[in-house]
Amino acid sequence: MRSILPAVVLLGVVITACNLFAKKAVETPPPETIPVKTAEQLLAEEQARQDSIKNAEYLQMQQTPFGDLRFGMSKEEVTQNNEKRQKLGKYFYNFSYGFTPDDQLYKLKISSDGVKTIRYDSDLKANYQNLFSIIKTKYGEPETRHEFPSIFDVQDVKKYSMNKWTEGTKQIQLSLLENEINSYSAVCEITDMNRNAEELERVRKEKNKDITEASEKF
């Protein structure tokens, strides 16, 4: 009887070990299989990444009128980030700005120094062509383009539109301006069209405020 007991105990240990091993094998999930991407899938993912980068750059470009300036900046931020007079290409130009009533930049104006009538076909033309070349280098051919007009054409309209570029919500307008008698400038206006539309609507309502208020009494 004593010789059988150790064998029985050993058999019990073996059976228990086998049961534990079998249970562990059942409970342990198989290793996760990582799918292998095809060349087409990898190419599509890379294209999506590049498109995302381009979209972000394009959105930033639309909100950048010049240099470190951004549409929506306050007067203080604009003053800190941009000089009021700068040399662009071969000539110096003056910077001025348009702000909404809640102090958001929505328009930037770059103007050449005033040129007298006698220098219209030389100095003014050179200042205009300098600005045109700079903008064209960045944005390509404009949507509209006119030949350099006679001084009488500018006198008739005071502001003669020469070229226009549109990039999303940003519009760039290049014009010739009669500042006053015997003074002309080349002017580049860079505008956030969304904020500009809101500002025009605000001005329109303010101008017609008395009429609107009177109409409400009827």
Image: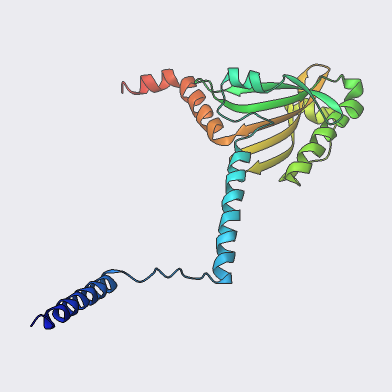
Q: Is residue 149 visible?
A: no
Instruction: Quadrant for residue 209, please give it.
Output: top left
Residue at point 52%, 69% (across, down): 37
Instruction: Quadrant for residue 41, please give it.
Output: bottom right
Quarter of the figure that contains the C terminus: top left
In the shown orientation, is residue 154 left or right of residue 59?
Answer: right
- The location of residue 64, given as percent across then percent down, is 63, 34
Q: Quick check: 78 above or below 163?
A: above
Instruction: Quadrant for residue 29, please give it.
Output: bottom left
- The location of residue 14, given as percent across then percent down, is 22, 77
Q: Give the residue at the far front of this rendering.
A: 2
Quarter of the figure that contains the N terminus: bottom left
In the shown orientation, is residue 93 left or right of residue 45?
Answer: right
Q: Quick check: 7 above or below 47?
A: below
Nearer-the-camera pick, 164 or 83? 83
In the shown orientation, is residue 192 left or right of residue 11?
Answer: right
Q: Give the residue at the far left of this rendering.
A: 1
Q: Quick check: 18 above or below 176?
A: below
Residue at point 50%, 25% (across, down): 204
Q: Is residue 159 visible?
A: yes
Q: Quick check: 55 above or below 68?
A: below
- The location of residue 170, given as percent across then percent down, is 62, 38
Residue at point 60%, 36% (across, down): 63
Nearer-the-camera pick, 180 or 91? 91
In the shown orientation, is residue 65 left or right of residue 23?
Answer: right
Nearer-the-camera pick, 58 or 191? 58
